Image (cartoon, grey):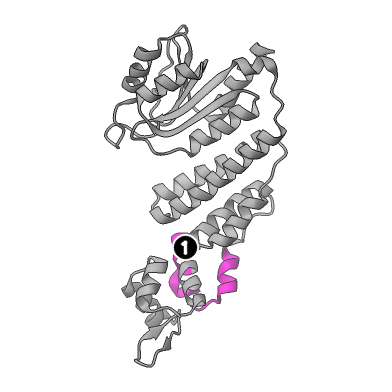
Amino acid sequence: MFSIRQMIELTGLSEFTIRGWENRYSAFDPQRSNTGRREYSKSDVERALLLRELLKRGHKISKIAKVNNKKLLGFFEQKADDVSPNSKVVTAALELMALQKWSELSRLFKKVQSKKTEELIQGFFLPVLTELASQIQAGIVSIAQEHVFSSFLKEKIYSALSDLENKKKTNRAHKKVRFVLATPEGDHHEIGLLLAHLLIRSSGFTSLYLGPHTPAQDIAETTLRFEATHLLIVSTISKKQGARQELLNFVGDIQKSVGSHFQIWLAGSQVPQFPFEQKSPLLNIGSFHEFDKHLKVLKEKRL
């Protein structure tokens, strides 16, 4: 049983809202402790989460307050028959996140499989990230929900990398292509970078993942020691948003240390929209589809 204070912490709803739904719409029927305090059940917590999310999707509390939990859950599952299996999985994952059913979400992620890494990225990871970003922007997802959901995504990516490593057969010609991957100092978003790492490995190339929030000097030193041919920088935040430098200044510092004999591929929301000169060592990438296209061109050149 949960107190009203615990109910507030678990659902993110205010005491005013909980009591309002209870008194006005009979959404809950809490028991009373020996001291007369309200005590809510696990079912009440789940019900509050269901009601909260359905209201965000346009339902009216007066219409759904007395509907049982099973039927409330059914409202989430009312989808068109022509929705693809991957779309259904993405929808299910986001609904489980909304209801904070983390154990069920973990089991769902483990079931997501694909014979080809490209299909896993294009059919699951990218759609779920796109929808997650949309819900974050709309204020539907809390910071805690985002962090937990992101941790499950990372686990899934690392699992896919491990599976790939176990069955990898790299062409000798491809071993000459060596990527280093990082985000600029101050940028802690790494899921896009991890997906790029996965796609590079699935293409048969060698890659070294430095990860997020990496100083320019560290990237430069690692690039030289690793004898990299390509550097991928994914930048998602500006200097105003917390990055130490604007992207092109950051890249300029790297080039001062390593020269311009290898290509630097730039991706993320902070990448300039204008194309670089044809002979420039810089290449801006606007999407994962475009990134995959460049990898395939690179692969053809090495065959």
Q: Depth check: give the residue in front, 59 or 173.
A: 173
Q: Most extreme residue toward the left, as rendered?
A: 240
> With respect to residue 181, does 149 lie above or below?
below
Residue occupying image coordinates x 34% and y 16%: 252
Question: Is residue 204 among the parts visible in the rendering?
Answer: yes
> With respect to residue 81, does 36 lie above or below?
below
Residue type (three-letter) at the residue carrying disc 1: Glu
Question: Is residue 124 among the parts visible in the rendering?
Answer: no
Question: Residue 287 location in percent, x, y?
Answer: 51, 29
Tag 1 residue: 53
Q: Main secondary structure of the magenta part?
A: helix
Q: Most extreme residue toward the front, as rendered?
A: 225
Q: Residues within 10 Å of mark 1 (few under 14, many from 20)?
A: some
Q: Depth check: give the residue in front, 29 or 198.
A: 198
Residue occupying image coordinates x 49% and y 62%: 100
Q: Quadrant of the C terminus?
A: top right
Question: Residue 109 location in percent, x, y?
Answer: 61, 51
Q: Secondary structure at mark 1?
A: helix
Q: Most extreme residue toward the bottom, as rendered?
A: 34
Specify the segment rendered in magenta.
Answer: 51-76
Question: Residue 234 location in percent, x, y?
Answer: 44, 29
